[in-house]
Structures are given as structure tokens and as C-alpha cells.
Image (tube, helix red, strand yellow):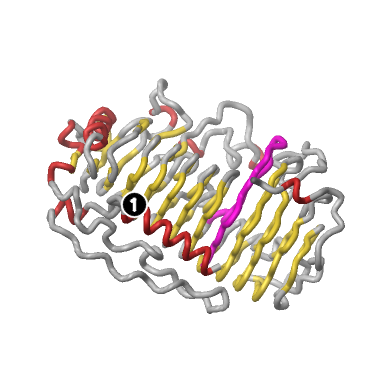
Amino acid sequence: MSFIRGSLVLWIAMILFIHNLDNVDGRYHNHKRQKKPSPAPKPPSTPEDPPSPPSNDPPGVPSDPYPNDPGDSSGCVFDVRSFGAVGDGSADDTAAFRDAWKAACAVESGVVLVPENYCFMITSTIFSGPCKPGLVFQVDGTLMAPDGPESWPKADSRNQWLVFYRLDRMTLNGTGTIEGNGEQWWDLPCKPHRGPNEKSVSGPCESPTMIRFFMSSNLMLRGVKIQNSPMFHVKFDGCQGVLIDKLSISSPKLSPNTDGIHLGNTRGVGIYNTMISNGDDCISIGPGCSDVDIEGVTCAPTHGISIGSLGVHNSQACVSNLTVRNTIIKESDNGLRIKTWQGGTGSVTGLKFENIQMENVRNCIIIDQYYCLSKECLNQTSAVHVNDVSYRNIKGTYDVRTPPIHFACSDTVACTNITLSDVELLPYEGELLDDPFCWNAYGTQETMTIPPLGCLREGLPDTVVELSSYECS
């Protein structure tokens, strides 16, 4: 575990040393050379150590990855007001942002500055590369989407708002706020909580993802406040090398489909010291993701940390090498969840959940291989193979309406190599619910769980399929 995490941390640190991913505040305000990097932090604690509060800095990230600061020049800062942006919250400042982006993109270590004490409204925009290395999009003021579907330009895509495309070595940071104005989108009758019996009704239901990174690499997001997205707050598609630190992501508890951070086909991700409260998954990991490290995250309230859903429409889905450590999940519909559709192929393997504190959480630990959004799903033989998943030092309280541990695995493709150690979950209110659910789940209890887990099978299954055929290359 320490070796894997150390390798990921070293890999991220090496990326950051070759380009300028640090905050530009010092360069913009003072234009001074910065200090040398601080000494490397101590290695993280082993799984046997007691949980500790999240650190203030992401592990392995130096204080100044570019000590000689080649962009140490006031000429590299492109204030959007200099390109005609008004910043009164009502004028359309889209053209000014596009012009500022174009200018910053053309120089090394260019900075698009959204200054404090101003509110800029822009419409759906693609900020495209390739650009010179070290580009920074710094939000110190407020950046705001149009106010709901009626204000959304008819010519604009309703699937996304801010898109960052084909970029390498780019930073989104600042002390300001990115506002999605999502309330009117949540109230559309097609949303689950607006139809009869909380079911969606027919009709167009397009809602924009707030911030999307697409086919980009070596990205850093730090410090900004992202709130009230119409749909997903931050989404990564086809990216490699992502460092997220000290973000604040928020929307109301009942806002539908407002995942905090979503990863799809993305590799090499570190998410640290981040606060997320929303109406859907805190962090969701989709197909094609690997080498994901999460630490010091607080999810409260959310639908928990989810791997999936995977294997929809008989597709292949592969997720590997995920670690979640020193994290808090509160007042959530789910805790740590793996969800797959019947009929899929591929595998989920190498997942480690360690030092997790739960508070009033339904389905604290859940594997659901019968995920379905309707009552019309048919039983199918094939399934995504869930293998090598460990839960260590998972403690706290659960909502007694559902069992705190639920392993519902495929009839033909069993879950294998599940490990539990120091799992202690007590009822938040009411009597102890001591009947965790298992179906075709195999693994090991290194210590007795609370409540007792008598349904986990030992060893390996006499499976009716060859499990090696489900492995991902």
C-alpha cells in the first residue's frame, strides 16, 4: 500500500516540477522570486496506524514547483477586464473571456485573471488548446452561468457549460467562486424529485455539466469554490494526471444528479483535502479509471463515494487501483459503493478503503451487482468481476433503515478476495441491525466486524465461468 501510494505521489510531484502549477498570486501581486521547495513530507501512515485528520497540504506536492518562475513578469497576466469584460453580473462577458484565453494560451505561464470584487456572467464556452505550458485560469472573483434554462442561449449546448479541451499542464485555481445557477434546472419536471412519487416524467431533460476537462493531461485544480451546478460539478473525460486540492463543492441535498467530482476514462488522479456536499455522488468513478488516490475528503451530505455504475448495455468496464483514506462521510444515502449492471464484462480490482469515519450513513459498505433504474431489468449471466477489495478501519454510525453491510454479487461471477478488518458500525438511532446481507461474496475477516458478518464465504468459489476471461488488459 505504502509503495503504491509513494509511487503515485512521486509521479505527481515529478509532473509538477516540470511546469508551473503553483498559485499565481505571488507572481501577480509581488512579482518576486519564490522560495525553494520545502522538504519532502513524511511517508503516510500505514493502514495499521490510527486515523488522523486530513493534512493541510496534498502529500508530495512541493510548495513551489517552479522556484525560478520563468513567468515572473506582469505581462503574463491577462485580466479579463482589459478585454472588455464588465463584471456586473448581468452583462454577457463571454467574448472577453475568449479573447483573454486566446492571449494567455499563446504565451508560456499565461494567466487568465478573473479579478476579485466582480461577477462575470458567461455562456457555454470551450476553452481549447493546445496552449503553451503553465497556463493558469485564476478565479478570484465570481464566474457565473446564465440563470436557468430560459436564460440559456438557444444556440448553446445544454450538456456542458465550461469545457477545457486538449490542454497540458494547466491550472484552475483562485480564491473566488464559480456559480452554476442550477436551481431552475433542478426544478425541471423530468428530474426525479419533481415527478409524481419522486419519479421522472417524460420530456427533454438536458442539463449542463458545470466544468468539464476533456482529453487533457497534467491538470491541477485548487482552492476555488464551485457551487450549485445544474448537473455534475466537475467532470474529467479521457484525462491523465490530475491533482485536486482544497476544493469546496456544494449544492443542496435534494439537487438531482449533482455529482461532485466524476471521473471517466481517466488515470493518475489525486484528490485531497476537499469538502463536498450535494444531491448525488460525492465522487463517482466510471469505466476506464485507474490509479486514483483520495485522502482527506469530507462528503456531507452526499450519496457517498461510488465506483460505477459499470457494465451498462452489456459493455466492458474496467476500474483498478483505487485508494480512499482518512475520509469522512456524513448524513449520506450511501457510504462506499460499487454498483454494476447485469450483463457487463470486465473487472473492478485493487480497491482499498482505509480509515473512514461514517456518521448516520445508509448502506455504509455496499456492493450491488444488480443495479437497475427500473423494474424491467432481466437477469443475465455475465457480470463485471469484483475482486480484491479491502475495508480497513471503517467506523461510525449507520441509518438503521438498511443494513450497514450489503454484498449482492452476481450468481455466476462471484465477488472474490474481499477483506474486512476493524469494521465497527453502530446504529445512529434505534436498535442494532445485526443482519448484514451477502450473496455469492467470498473473502476474509481479519477481525470480527460490528455488526457480525456471518454470511461472507471463505476461500474461492466453484465458479461456472472462467474468471480470467473477465480481466482487463
Which residue is located at x 52 percent, y 58 percent? Answer: 301
- The image shows residue 50, relative to residue 173, as above or below, that is below
Q: Is residue 364 left or right of residue 413?
A: left
* Residue ID at (18%, 40%): 79
Q: Which residue is mark 1?
A: 224
Viewer-nearest residue: 440 or 276: 440
Q: Is residue 137 visible?
A: no
Residue found at x 38% / y 28%: 151
- Looking at the image, residue 467 sits to the left or right of residue 79; the answer is right
Residue 320 among those drawn in magenta: yes
Q: Quadrant of the N terminus?
A: bottom right
For residue 198, say whether it is visible.
yes
Residue visible at 75% across and 59% down?
Answer: 416
**Residue 277 at x, y percent in the picture:** 48, 55
Q: Which residues are magenta?
A: 302-325
Q: Name the quadrant of the C terminus.
A: top right
Q: Amino acid under label 1?
A: Val
Toward the viewer: 16 or 297? Answer: 16
* Number of marks in the rendered image: 1
Is the residue 50 above or below the residue 61 in the image?
below
Nearest the camera: 123 or 203?
123
